[in-house]
Image (cartoon, coloured by chain):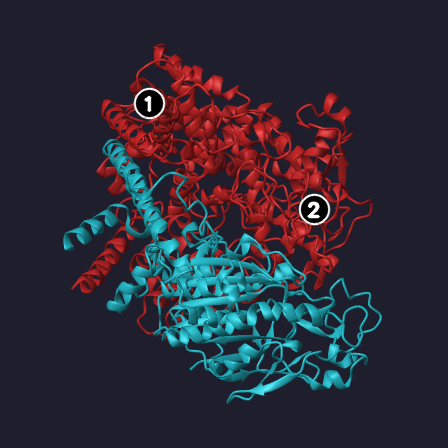
């Protein structure tokens, strides 16, 4: 065994170690924890990221349940009885205060306030208000931290989504997951550090795009790898029909022999690196289907997540898969659930969307908790902006729509050293402006990185002459929500 | 025990890595760091100041601390504003210079850079600054901002090695370092290399045989000439330009519907094949519409500046997006054509290079006059496939003028092109880069520090191209020559091919770069001539073998004492597979095609609107076109291309990363494209008479482009024998053969076919197959 490890080590060395390896920089991070002085001041020179933990990380992994299209905060987590009282009345100009409008409501002559079609109740010890659309989330309210004072700068989906995922509205910057992969590496040598899972509800949808899980200017080993709970969980993972593992192994052995001849001739370490990548691919072929196979989950788990979790490609199936991937050491599992863009027909569409995600989101929290994993796993739930307190288009007693609203909206976070059972931040009685503890997208990123032991100002990558950060040039850690 | 050992090993690797990384961190230091006898501001000092000091003591007036700037000599020599008795720099006297005192102090309150900056100088950097001050603290203008002058040809000892001018510069440096270049590569390797670099296709067996048999002194020259005259040359050269021009087949953003911009791509291929001089090539693309009596071809060329993403998201704010498009053009111009990070001055003065924010918006003004809107239409029918201004290409145009446009039907065809409005749109400096935060009004202009904008030039895009191709422009020629060099050597003479500024890397061979740049201008910006020069140099012809010594002293091959060895670009991986199997359909141009793709990719990530909500795979010939014709839907680019590091065409890219990942291995093993090619080639070979060794040898030659060694043939033949047995036993050949739409010949024995297919698939998966060596 020891001999094997040593040989493996020498191979590493010969290939200039980390440059291309899946283990990524995480292993170096680990090394640095053992002898902290080793790296002081020398990351730049060593070409390593300076984001090595300055403090003990609280979270090791992230699961981000992104609600794509922007769910309304006013029908979920931000209770505003005033809007019901003032139903149909005009939004006071003093409240709007020059907020720009999207092209969809810019020509609307009036802005009638509209209250939530759904009732709210208080839950748990925190007594937080949650709407009737989220009964399961209500049950785990004492495990989550609701932030009601998020704001962003973008007002349209593409830039807002890109901002949340990459820290910039435009441009090919690395995604959050890529930054984490770069900063911390993978915990599992058979799995990528950053994986992506997609699902879609029946509500009005907005697309997602691979730019959201791009490595940007980082090495492509940090790119998000799209997983699915279907037939072929990773692209090209499945061996072709008629070929078994034994035959694949044989082919790899032949290849290794032939490649070795080539190495003898050229002496190029990349040749050995290639052989190693084929070996990892081979291991992934076994490891990934084992993890993505949900059919062997026990009944109580199926019950917890709901029957949808056995239908590949649903949000519920993806939540369960996310738990398994995370449990197996994937640093960042990014889910997207599409269909939250309720410009019209909100009461009806939002009910469907909430039904898609409520049970499974709560189940994920419960499941992680019962496995003792919630403490080290940060779970995030939310969209790219909020929705207006006035109706877009015609409004009736039981039907209305809401336009995009970047100035104030709600998300929740749980686990990973985030204070459970609290509500942070406050909006005005119109649910339009923040009156207490605003949280900018940059602050959100800084806080997430902090929980993983990374200083957002130090996790930099120099590209075309500039040191880039996930938080660009701003961001502060929100200490009040941290345990 | 296992665990402890694991941690120990990790620590060990970490140390090893750091040691190695230190050896190669600064790309121009090949061996261990030693202070040079004479310290050069440009090469030794400025990189340190720029990286660690200019952020607070540089060109950005708003962020400048203590009113001190260190990027200009007179400013740095002055008495300090905060302490007039002291000076930042006192030539010859480090101990009287605040700069040195503060970087060398142990007192953290006094130390520079301050702790809060997270920046730190190394001991070596401090010594360089000290020695520089001792030698007089002399400043020099940034090398890339002074016009190139043709240097003298260096004298070399081993003149026999030299094939052309390039080699004098390379050999001169090698001889100084006491390194001997590699011998010439063997003929087969050389042919594969040149063929892939010049045409993007592997050589055929006929080409290999002919070249091997040609014992004349200029056999290689003849081959290069024939490659250069192949129409595939234009395709190969276009590949890089399509990245530069962020060409794609969809509008990008949210809904990401179809756009019909491909006739512009056909023009690029045509222009390279016609060997259009670079100055004309760029002038047409930037300003073809403004040329006197602009032709349809000149107008089509301007599609370059309309390849950027265009939103179709209902409800966006029009001006926000219009400004975004102008910004994209400005940034692309900066990065692609003059190789500077102009975009850094979008929100504030540039922090490192002498470009003010105002100058950014002066360049912006050239591109700000287009008759366009931020959002013209949401997802719709054919009328939305190009946005105004646009041109229509009729079948008559294709017959008479635009013969190179591969239009295959009689449908209406529209392409987005440039066209200015009659009245000049006012350009404002945008505060913090925000689209509606108007600052002062600015006029079109270019950064003063590069070359002043002559009064003779019109203040429009046409004038801008005259400024570009003024021989005194320090960047245009250097930047392009460097990009071409990068495509042949995998690394530019300036490694940061998109950043020639203060933060960019210094050239590894500055005299060579300048010689090439001047030579290129003096010979009419002749691109084919430049390519020929590179391909015929002894430097390029070396073998790619790397000795342990060279690997140790120069792992990144900066000195060029060997040929580079690296995996070929994504599109070429596909080309090698299709071409060697005989499947390749070498039609040039036309609408992009949709080959095999795993199901559900487009469907899983769509808003559900538009032509591209579902992937409708093509059939027949369209399955076998070159990689560059694979349809690029920006939000879900073709998966194998992405796996092999192709650009997603979101923005201008001048250089691709080169990674090596397990996903690449999976794609090569399981992508139906590779499996089908293996089957088809096996089928073809089994119809020949001969032994299985002869067949395998032929497959090997077609795919790896050289004759296999005995050991290789033996190994593959035994693998074939084994597979024959396996398929006979399991009688599952049919299953394995059922891949791809290309029909199976009825003549061949299924068991033999499946076994041969496995052997060929293995050859496709060899490291050497998709490597230029």
Q: As drawn, is B462 to the left or to the right of A189?
A: right
Write down the quadrant of residue A62 in the picture: bottom left
Callout 2: chain: B
Q: Residue at x 29, y 64 (%)?
A: A30
Tag 1 near tag 2, CB within 8 Å: no
Identify residue for label 2. B366
Q: Position of residue B536 (x, y in %)?
A: 41, 22
Chain in cyan in the render: A
> What shade does chain B have?
red
Q: Nearer the viewer, residue A44 or A89?
A: A89
* Distance of label 1 from label 2 (alpha carbons): 59 Å
| Marker disc for residue B529 | none
Q: As drawn, is A410 to the left or to the right of A390?
A: left
Q: Residue at x 63, y 70 (%)?
A: A71
Q: Nearer the viewer, residue A242 or B339?
A: A242
Please state which of the two labelled residues, at mark 1 or mark 2, is closer to the viewer.
Answer: 1
User: Can the viewer see residue B150 in this picture?
Assistant: no
Q: Nearer the viewer, residue B369 or B613?
A: B613
Query: Please, what secondary structure does the residue beneath circle 2 have?
Result: helix
Write down the quadrant of residue B435 in the picture: bottom right
Identify residue for label 1. B696
Q: Position of residue B195 (x, y in %)?
A: 44, 24
Q: Position of residue B268 (x, y in %)?
A: 61, 31
* Image vertical order of residue B551 relative to residue A420, above or below: above
Query: Please, what secondary structure does the residue beneath circle 1 have?
Result: helix
Residue furthest to the right in view is A109
Write down the quadrant of residue A408 in the picture: bottom right
Callout 1: chain: B
Looking at the rendered structure, whether the residues under marks 1 and 2 are on a common chain is answered as yes
Q: Residue at x 37, y 29 (%)?
A: B754
């Amino acid at each position: 065994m020891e001999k094997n490890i040593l040989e493996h080590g020498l191979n590493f060395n010969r290939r200039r170690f980390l440059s291309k390896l899946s283990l990524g920089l995480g292993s170096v991070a680990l090394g640095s924890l053992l002898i902290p002085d080793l790296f002081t001041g020398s990351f730049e020179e060593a070409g390593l990221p300076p984001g090595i933990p300055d403090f003990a990380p609280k979270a090791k992994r992230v699961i981000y349940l992104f609600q794509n299209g922007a769910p309304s905060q006013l029908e979920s987590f931000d209770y505003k009885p005033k809007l019901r009282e003032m139903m149909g009345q005009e939004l006071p100009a003093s409240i709007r205060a020059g907020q720009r409008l999207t092209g969809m409501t810019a020509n609307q002559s009036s802005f009638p306030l509209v209250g939530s079609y759904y009732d709210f109740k208080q839950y748990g010890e925190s007594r937080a208000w949650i709407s009737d659309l989220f009964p399961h989330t209500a049950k785990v309210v004492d495990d989550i931290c609701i932030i009601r004072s998020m704001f962003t700068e973008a007002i349209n989906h593409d830039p807002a989504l890109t901002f949340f995922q990459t820290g910039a509205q435009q441009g090919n910057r690395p995604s959050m997951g890529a930054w984490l992969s770069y900063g911390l590496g993978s915990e599992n040598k058979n799995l990528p550090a950053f994986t992506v899972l997609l699902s879609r509800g029946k509500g009005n949808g907005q697309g997602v795009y691979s730019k959201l899980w791009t490595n940007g200017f980082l090495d492509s080993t940090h790119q998000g790898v799209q997983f699915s709970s279907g037939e072929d969980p990773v692209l090209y993972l499945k061996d072709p029909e008629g070929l078994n593992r034994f035959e694949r192994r044989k082919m790899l052995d032949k290849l290794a022999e032939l490649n070795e001849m080539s190495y003898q001739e050229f002496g190029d370490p990349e040749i050995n690196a290639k052989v190693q990548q084929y070996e990892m691919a081979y291991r992934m072929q076994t490891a990934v289907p084992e993890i993505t196979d949900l059919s062997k989950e026990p009944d109580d788990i199926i019950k917890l997540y709901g029957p949808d979790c056995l239908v590949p490609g649903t949000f519920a199936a993806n939540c369960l898969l996310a738990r398994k991937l995370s449990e197996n050491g994937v640093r960042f599992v990014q889910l997207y659930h599409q269909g939250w863009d309720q410009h019209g027909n909100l009461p009806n569409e939002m009910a469907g969307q909430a039904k898609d995600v409520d049970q499974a989101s709560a189940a994920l929290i419960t499941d992680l908790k019962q496995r003792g994993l919630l403490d080290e796993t940060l779970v995030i739930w939310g969209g790219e902006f909020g929705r207006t307190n006035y109706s877009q288009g015609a409004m009736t007693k039981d039907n209305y729509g809401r336009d995009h609203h970047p100035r104030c909206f709600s998300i929740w976070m749980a686990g990973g050293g985030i204070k459970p059972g609290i509500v942070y931040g406050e909006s005005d009685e119109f649910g339009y402006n923040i009156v207490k503890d605003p949280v900018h997208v940059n602050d959100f990123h800084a806080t997430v990185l902090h929980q993983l032991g990374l200083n957002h100002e130090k996790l930099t990558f120099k590209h075309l002459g500039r040191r880039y950060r996930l938080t660009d040039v701003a961001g502060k850690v929100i200490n009040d929500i941290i345990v | 025990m296992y665990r402890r050992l694991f941690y120990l090993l990790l620590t060990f690797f970490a140390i090893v890595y750091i040691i190695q990384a230190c050896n190669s961190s600064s790309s121009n230091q090949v061996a261990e760091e030693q202070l040079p006898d004479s310290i050069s501001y440009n090469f030794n000092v400025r990189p340190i100041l720029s990286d660690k000091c200019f952020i607070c003591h540089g060109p950005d007036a708003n962020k400048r601390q203590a009113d001190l700037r260190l990027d200009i000599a007179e400013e740095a020599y002055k008495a300090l504003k905060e302490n007039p008795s002291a000076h930042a720099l006192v030539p010859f006297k480090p101990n009287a210079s605040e700069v040195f005192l503060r970087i060398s102090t142990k007192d953290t309150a006094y130390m520079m850079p301050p702790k809060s900056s997270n920046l730190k100088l190394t001991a070596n950097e401090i010594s360089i600054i000290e020695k520089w001050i001792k030698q007089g603290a002399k400043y020099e203008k940034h090398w890339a901002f002074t016009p190139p002058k043709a240097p003298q040809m260096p004298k070399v000892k081993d003149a026999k090695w030299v094939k052309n001018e390039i080699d004098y510069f390379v050999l001169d440096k090698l001889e100084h370092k006491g390194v001997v270049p590699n011998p010439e590569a063997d003929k087969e390797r050389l042919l594969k290399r040149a063929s892939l670099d010049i045409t993007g296709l592997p050589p055929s067996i006929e080409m290999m045989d002919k070249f091997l048999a040609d014992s004349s002194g200029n056999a290689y020259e003849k081959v290069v000439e024939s490659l250069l005259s192949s129409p595939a040359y234009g395709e190969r050269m276009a590949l890089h330009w399509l990245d530069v021009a962020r060409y794609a087949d969809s509008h990008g953003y949210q809904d990401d519907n179809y756009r019909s911009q491909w006739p512009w791509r056909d023009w690029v291929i045509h222009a390279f094949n016609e060997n259009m001089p670079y100055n004309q090539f760029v002038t047409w693309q930037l300003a073809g519409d403004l040329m006197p009596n602009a032709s349809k071809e000149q107008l089509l060329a301007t599609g370059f500046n309309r390849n950027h993403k265009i939103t179709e998201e209902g409800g966006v704010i029009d001006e926000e997006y219009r400004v975004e498009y102008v910004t994209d053009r400005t940034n692309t111009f900066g990065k692609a054509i003059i190789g500077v990070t102009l975009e850094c001055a979008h929100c504030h003065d540039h922090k490192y290079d002498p470009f003010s924010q105002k100058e950014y918006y002066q360049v912006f003004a050239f591109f700000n006059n287009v008759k366009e809107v931020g959002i013209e239409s949401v997802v719709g029918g054919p009328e939305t496939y190009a946005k105004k201004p646009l041109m229509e290409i009729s079948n008559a145009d294709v017959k008479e003028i635009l013969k190179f446009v591969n239009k295959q039907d009689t449908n209406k065809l529209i392409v987005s092109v440039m066209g200015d409005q009659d009245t000049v749109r006012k350009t404002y400096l945008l505060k913090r880069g925000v689209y509606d935060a108007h600052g002062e009004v600015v006029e079109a202009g270019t950064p003063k520090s590069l070359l002043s904008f002559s009064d003779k030039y019109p203040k429009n895009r046409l004038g801008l191209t005259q400024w570009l191709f003024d021989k005194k422009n320090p960047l245009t020629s250097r930047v392009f020559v460097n990009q071409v060099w990068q495509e042949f050597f995998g690394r530019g003479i300036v490694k940061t091919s998109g950043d020639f500024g203060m933060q960019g890397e210094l050239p590894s061979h500055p005299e060579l770069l300048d010689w090439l740049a001047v030579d290129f201008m003096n010979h009419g910006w002749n691109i084919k001539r430049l390519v020929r020069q590179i391909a015929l140099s002894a430097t390029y012809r070396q073998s790619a073998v790397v000795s342990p010594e060279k690997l140790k002293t120069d792992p990144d091959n900066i000195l060029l004492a060997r040929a580079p060895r690296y995996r070929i670009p994504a599109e070429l991986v596909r080309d090698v597979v299709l071409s060697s199997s005989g499947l390749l359909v070498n039609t040039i141009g036309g609408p992009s095609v949709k080959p095999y793709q795993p199901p559900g990719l487009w469907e899983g990530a769509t808003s559900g609107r538009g032509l591209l909500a579902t992937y409708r795979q093509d059939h027949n010939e369209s399955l076998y076109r070159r990689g560059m014709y694979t349809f690029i839907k920006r939000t879900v680019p073709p998966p194998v291309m992405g796996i092999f590091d192709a650009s997603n065409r979101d923005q201008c890219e001048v250089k691709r990363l080169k990674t090596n990942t397990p996903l690449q291995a999976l794609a090569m093993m399981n992508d139906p494209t590779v499996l089908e090619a293996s089957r088809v080639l096996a089928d073809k070979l089994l119809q020949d008479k001969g032994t299985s060794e002869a067949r395998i040898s032929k497959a090997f030659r077609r795919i790896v482009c050289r004759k296999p060694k005995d050991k290789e043939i033996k190994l593959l033949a035994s693998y074939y024998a084994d597979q024959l047995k396996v398929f006979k036993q399991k009688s599952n050949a049919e299953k394995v053969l059922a891949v791809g739409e290309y029909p199976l010949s009825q003549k061949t024995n299924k068991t033999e076919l499946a076994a041969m297919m496995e052997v060929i698939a293995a050859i496709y998966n060899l490291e050497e197959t998709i490597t230029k060596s």
